[in-house]
Image (spheres, helix red, strand yellow):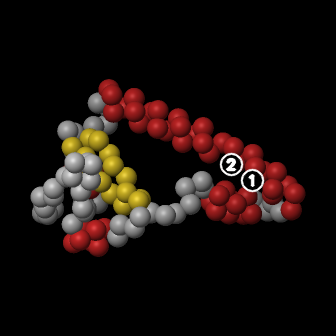
Amino acid sequence: MPQAIDRKRVSISVKRQFTIPQKFYEALGFESDAECILQDGGIFIRPLRNESSDFSEEILADLVAQGLSGQELLARFKEQTKKVRPAVQRLIEEADEAAKSGAGKQSTNDLFSTAKN
């Protein structure tokens, strides 16, 4: 069954600013940053957590799990971190191409449905 949609009208200032309604802000756990996504003729705004986005912890955990330590750990960590930015850039390019071609197009209901597949 589709989820009920909660709507609130907001005013936009001459500086293109608006206030996220407190109810939405608290329910979604916004902090200091948000991500805006242009999709299907609208803007989708969601909280952007202040978490490390460079994957350092994940890379280190994987390397330690492989039994690396000392200088070998440091060298492999440097190698792996150099690969992150190009990989993310490729993902962004692929997403942009999919968006342009309409491949994988989903409605916001499809994206945020609580139903388990």
At which x and y percent is residue 57?
64, 62
Quadrant of the rendered image containing residue 88: top right
Q: Residue at x 33, y 57 (%)?
A: 46
In the picture of the structure, the residue carrying the numbered disc 2 is 81
Seen as rendered, the residue at the extreme right is: 71
Q: Which label number is shown at residue 42?
A: none
At which x and y percent is residue 32?
41, 64
Q: Residue at x 76, y 49 (%)?
A: 78
Neighbour tally class for label 1: few under 14, some 14-19, many 20 plus, Cα within 10 Å? some
Between 101 and 36, the one nearer to me in the picture? 36
Please state the total of marks drawn on the protein image: 2
In the picture of the structure, the residue carrying the numbered disc 1 is 77
- SS at badge 1: helix
Q: Residue at x 32, y 26 (%)?
A: 101
Q: Amino acid at mark 1?
A: Phe
At which x and y percent is residue 44?
27, 50
Neighbour tally class for label 2: few under 14, some 14-19, many 20 plus, Cα within 10 Å? some
Between 12 and 64, the one nearer to me in the picture? 12
Check if mark 1's residue and mark 2's residue have beta carbons within 8 Å: yes
- SS at badge 2: helix
Q: Is residue 80 left or right of residue 102?
A: right
Q: Is residue 67 left or right of residue 16?
A: right
